[in-house]
Image (cartoon, grey):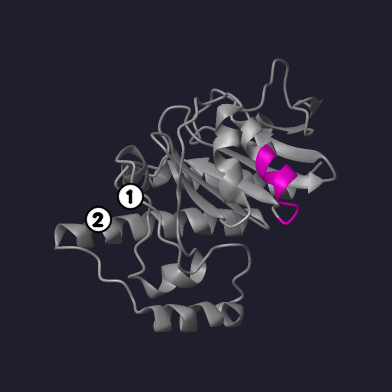
Amino acid sequence: MYEDIKQQIVEVCHKMWLKGWVAANDGNVTVKVGENRYLATRTGISKYEITPEHIGLIDGDFNIIESPSEGWKPSSEVKMHIKCYNDRPDVGAVVHAHPPVSTGFACAHKSLDDYCMIETVIAVGSVPLTPYGTPSTFEVPEAIEPYLQEHDVMLLENHGALTVGADLTTAYYRMETLELQAQISLVARLLGGAKDISRENIDRLISMRPNYGVTGRHPGYKKYNTDN
């Protein structure tokens, strides 16, 4: 079952590996396929090597509903994914990766609150830095909880990045947009600092979101402390 969606997950995993967003066994992807049913990538596998046979079906209590092979287990990060689905009924897919520049901001404890790129203002808005949580534990779901209701894109302190979307393509594209914004922001800071678009023009860009088919939850202007 779900062969088309499994193939989409495989393609996203391969793209993330090729872009250098994941190394070794890093990263994980889930997609909601029904009430309390989620396709999840296997734990302990390179995203370069993943195939549909490495993707299984779980429920919201982490029970394995369909295992593609003996001994299959989902990524240990599914706790974070299930939190997204439980708190956001509009979410249909979750992507977690370690894109280098975005993760650099997360390791420097800096949110991505530059409003210098038109496309980023429209597509993802402000990107908060969520508090530290030990991977594979419930600390990470608890850390992202305060931000989930307003954000589709988050930096995880000393960890990586998380994006959600109504579907897998949307969640993946938001990760692409995040990493591009991080690269642009880094260059702008090296050149003396990013110059924000005016608040008036930010509001105009936000009002254009429906014209571009932008859905989800991402504030257009919300400064976070980046000096912590």
Q: Nearer the viewer, residue 120 or 145?
A: 145
Numbered circle sitting on residue 87: none
Stretch of the chain drawn in magenta = 83-90
Residue type marked 2 = Leu
The vertical placement of 62 against 98, above or below, is: above
Magenta stretch: helix, strand or loop mostly? helix
Q: Is residue 77 magenta?
A: no
Q: Which residue is mark 1?
A: 226
Q: Residue furthest left?
A: 191
* Nearest to viewer (mark 1 / mark 2): 1
Q: Secondary structure at mark 1?
A: loop
Q: Residue 40: x, y in percent?
A: 67, 35
Q: Badge 1: few (under 14), some or many (20 or more) residues near its Cα, within 10 Å?
A: some
Instruction: Name which quarter of the figure residue 141 lies in.
Output: top right
Query: Is residue 91 found left or right of 144 in the rendered image?
Result: right
Q: Residue 218: x, y in percent?
A: 55, 63
Q: Residue furthest right?
A: 35
Q: Nearer the viewer, residue 26 or 207?
A: 207
Tell me how far mark 1 sits from mark 2, CA to CA: 14 Å
Q: Which residue is mark 2?
A: 186
The vertical placement of 123 against 204, above or below, is: above
First of labels 1, 2 by sequence position: 2
Query: Which residue occupies 72% across, 22% down?
Result: 69
Q: Badge 2: few (under 14), some or many (20 or more) residues near its Cα, within 10 Å?
A: some
Residue type marked 1 = Thr
